[in-house]
Amino acid sequence: MAVYERFRAWQLCHELSVAVYQATRSWPKAELFGLSSQARRAAHSAAANIAEGSAKRGPREFRRYLDISLGSLSELSYTLLLAKDLEILTQEEWNRLDQLHRNAGGMTWFLYKSLLDKKGTTARTL
C-alpha cells in the first residue's frame, strides 16, 4: 500500500473521483471537452495532489499540495453545481456527488489543518 492510500482524505477524494468519472459518462457528447472534462480533471487533481504531496519532504510541502487539492475540490463544486443548473445532472445525482464532495473536502481540510502546530505555523513533523 502506498503512503497516500492510508490517508482518509485521499480515500474520499478517490471515491469522489470514481463517482465523477461514472456520472460524466452519461453527460451530453457536446460537453466532452467542456464540463465533463473539467469535472473529471478537478476530481482527479484533488486525489492526485494528496498522493503527490505525501511523497514530498516535510509537512510544509505536503500542505502546499493539500492547498492545491482544496482548490480543485472548490472548482469541482462549482462545475457540479453548473451541471445541475443546466440539468445535465439530476437533483438526485447532484445530491450524491455533493455529499461525496463534502466528505472529501472536510477530510482534506482536516488533514491540512492537522499539519499546523498550535501557533498556526507549519508543523515540522508529520
Image (spheres, grey):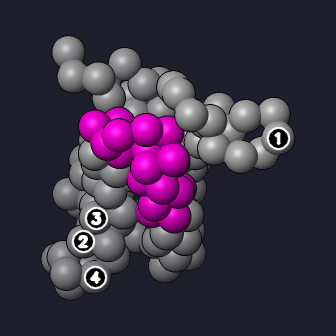
Q: Are circles 4 and 2 on residues that touch, CB within 8 Å?
A: yes
State the residue in front, 105 or 58. Answer: 58
Q: Name the kind of residue labelled 4 in the image.
A: Gly
- Give the numbered dot on residue 38: none
Q: Quadrant of residue 89?
A: bottom left
Q: Amino acid at mark 1?
A: Lys
- 48 vs 27: above or below: above
- The answer for how far apart the CA atoms under marks 2 and 3 are is 6 Å
> Which numbered circle lies on residue 34?
4
Q: Is residue 24 left or right of residue 65?
A: left
Provide the residue span drawn in magenta.
Answer: 53-72
Task: Kindly report the distance in space between the C-alpha atoms of the residues bearing marks 4 and 3.
Answer: 11 Å
**Residue 107 magenta:** no
Residue underneath mark 3: 41
Mark 2, other Cα within 10 Å: few <14 / some 14–19 / many ≥20: some
Q: Quadrant of the N terminus?
A: top left
Would you place residue 5 above or below residue 43 in this image? above
Q: Residue at x 32, y 57 (%)?
A: 45
The answer to the question of whether label 2 and label 3 lie on touching residues, with beta carbons closer than 8 A, is yes
Foreground tag (4 vs 3): 3
Q: Residue 83, position in %: x, y?
A: 46, 71
First of labels 3, 1 by sequence position: 3
Say if residue 23 shows up in the picture: no
Residues under labels 4 and 2: Cα distance?
A: 6 Å
- Specify the amino acid type for callout 2: Ser
Q: Amino acid at mark 3?
A: Arg
Label ID, residue 37: 2
Say whether residue 115 is left or right of residue 54.
right
Say which residue label 1 marks: 119
Task: Residue 27 in the image: state x and y as whole percent.
Answer: 27, 67
